[in-house]
Image (cartoon, coloured by chain):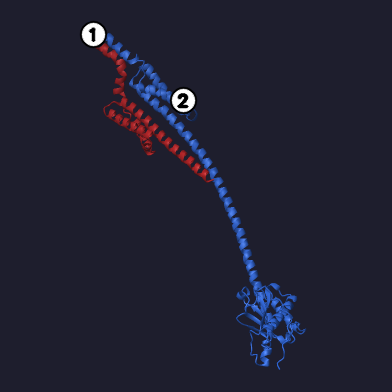
């Protein structure tokens, strides 16, 4: 009986002690306190005040349970839940902060893209301008080419008309050298002389006009003789005569840079020298309108190069007539 | 005091602290509504991809285990304890959802910043 009475007194005390007397909070409550303290000092206070308040209230319930019941199961459950609430508030706050960072980054990205677009548009405009300028130049070049072509056709037409006019008063033919205008020696010079006769001027004026209308060609004035007299004398005479014709043509405006004179002497007869008629035909001056390839080449017949004139030789003795 | 009265007194004095447990053990209704809301939170955490983030996955697993424990407790009639388990499970599931969202938002922010660096290098 006495032991039972003692037991009846001790047991409730022991239970009461077990229920209320411990001062060590359970691990869950300790964790909850730390989690809340950290959350309250962090961005949750700014970004998630409502969730932080919820965590505070949850912690308060756990604290009350601990105060009332000590480290009971309820205190541990409430502490566990309070810790989760504090962690939740922290996580939500970090998400908000990251969301703001993302929004700022998005804004900056749009600004950069606008800058890039502006830069690209600038480059495009510059390229378009360059293309337009190049197109303009090309169009101009095309126009210039067309103008050149038209001018060339006009020149060829004038040359053709001029040579057609010439053929009425002198011989004009085409050979391997180019267009050859042949003037009779007797029309141009007195026998054995190299001064132009007055009657020669009209023919040579026609020739000068024709040559002035022929563009992009060079001319060679060739003096020829018959075979009467020495070769040296004939060459000298033919050279002086070629120079005389050239000087006259220059005086009529033919471009000096395009014309040269050569004396061929008796070296290139067109007919036999055995007859008077043949000799008359051999005594001639040929004005050759050189073909383009020949125009840039060297002189034919062994004479001096183009541009270098023959020094007029001294006036020789006239040939002795045949006995 | 007779021995029987002492025993009753003993039981009665012990019942104050146990009563709650007894009441908790035997008297609470089955927390079916809480089971439904906890299951909903866990499903939401799974669907948002909580498994893809280590911290979120941890709390998702804790939520799942605690819900399972609650179901077992309910089967044994321990509804009060099951309610606590469900409350803990729901807290873990909600935290798993938040942590998963945080990880996704951080990744999106990092990607946006990376794009900015790329654009700056092109300008």
Q: Which mark is residue A4?
A: 1
Residue A222 in the image: state x and y as whole percent: 67, 81
Q: Which residue is mark 2?
A: A40
Crowdedness of circle 1 by 10 Å Cα count: few (<14), some, many (20+)?
some
Viewed as shown, does residue A240 lie left or right of A118?
right
- Which residue is more in the foreground, B54 or B12? B54
**Furthest residue in direction right, as rendered:** A198
Q: CA distance from mark 2 to mark 1?
A: 54 Å
- Residue A239 drawn above or below residue B13: below
Quarter occupied by the C terminus of chain A: bottom right
Q: Are marks 2 and 1 on the same chain?
A: yes
Q: Left of A295 or right of it: where is B122? A: left
Chain rendered blue: A
Which colour denotes chain B? Answer: red
Q: Quadrant of the N terminus of chain A?
A: top left
Residue nearer the viewer, B118 or A159: A159
Q: Is residue A285 visible?
A: no
- Mark 2 lies on a secondary structure that is helix
- Residue A232 picture quarter: bottom right
The chain that hosts pointer 2 is A
């Amino acid at each position: 009986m006495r032991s039972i009475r003692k037991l009846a007194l001790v047991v409730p005390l022991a239970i009461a002690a077990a229920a209320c007397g411990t001062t060590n909070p359970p691990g869950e409550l300790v964790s909850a306190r730390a989690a809340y303290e950290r959350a309250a000092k962090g961005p949750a206070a700014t970004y998630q005040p409502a969730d932080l308040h919820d965590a505070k209230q949850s912690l308060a319930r756990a604290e009350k349970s601990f105060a009332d019941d000590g480290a009971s199961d309820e205190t541990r459950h409430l502490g566990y839940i309070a810790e989760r609430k504090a962690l939740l508030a922290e996580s939500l706050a970090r998400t908000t902060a990251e969301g703001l960072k993302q929004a700022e980054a998005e804004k900056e990205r749009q600004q950069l893209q606008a800058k890039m677009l502006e830069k690209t548009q600038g480059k495009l405009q510059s390229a378009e301008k360059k293309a337009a300028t190049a197109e303009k130049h090309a169009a101009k070049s095309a126009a210039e080419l067309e103008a050149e072509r038209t001018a060339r056709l006009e020149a060829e037409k004038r040359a053709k008309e001029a040579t057609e006019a010439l053929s009425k008063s002198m011989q004009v033919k085409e050979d391997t050298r180019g267009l050859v205008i042949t003037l009779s020696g007797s029309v141009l010079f007195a026998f054995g002389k190299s001064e132009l006769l007055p009657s020669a001027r009209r023919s040579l004026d026609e020739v000068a006009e024709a040559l002035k209308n022929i563009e992009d060609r060079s001319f060679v004035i060739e003096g020829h003789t018959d075979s009467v007299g020495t070769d040296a004398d004939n060459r000298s005479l033919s050279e002086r005569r070629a120079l005389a014709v050239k000087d006259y043509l220059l005086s009529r405006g033919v471009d000096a840079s395009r014309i040269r004179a050569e004396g061929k002497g008796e070296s290139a007869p067109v007919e036999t020298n055995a007859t008077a008629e043949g000799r008359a035909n051999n005594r001639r001056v040929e004005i050759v309108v050189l073909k383009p390839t020949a125009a840039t080449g060297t002189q034919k017949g062994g004479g001096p190069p183009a541009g270098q004139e023959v020094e007029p030789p001294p006036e020789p003795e006239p040939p002795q007539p045949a006995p | 005091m007779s021995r029987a009265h002492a025993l009753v007194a003993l039981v009665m004095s012990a019942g104050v602290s146990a009563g709650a447990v007894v009441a908790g053990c035997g008297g609470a209704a089955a927390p079916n509504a809480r089971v439904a809301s906890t299951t909903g939170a866990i499903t939401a955490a799974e669907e948002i991809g909580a498994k893809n983030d280590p911290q979120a996955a941890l709390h998702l697993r804790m939520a799942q285990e605690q819900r399972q424990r609650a179901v077992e407790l309910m089967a044994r009639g321990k509804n009060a304890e099951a309610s606590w388990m469900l409350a803990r499970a729901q807290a873990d599931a909600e935290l798993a959802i938040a942590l998963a969202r945080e990880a996704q938002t951080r990744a999106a922010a990092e990607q946006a910043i990376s794009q900015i660096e790329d654009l700056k290098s092109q300008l």
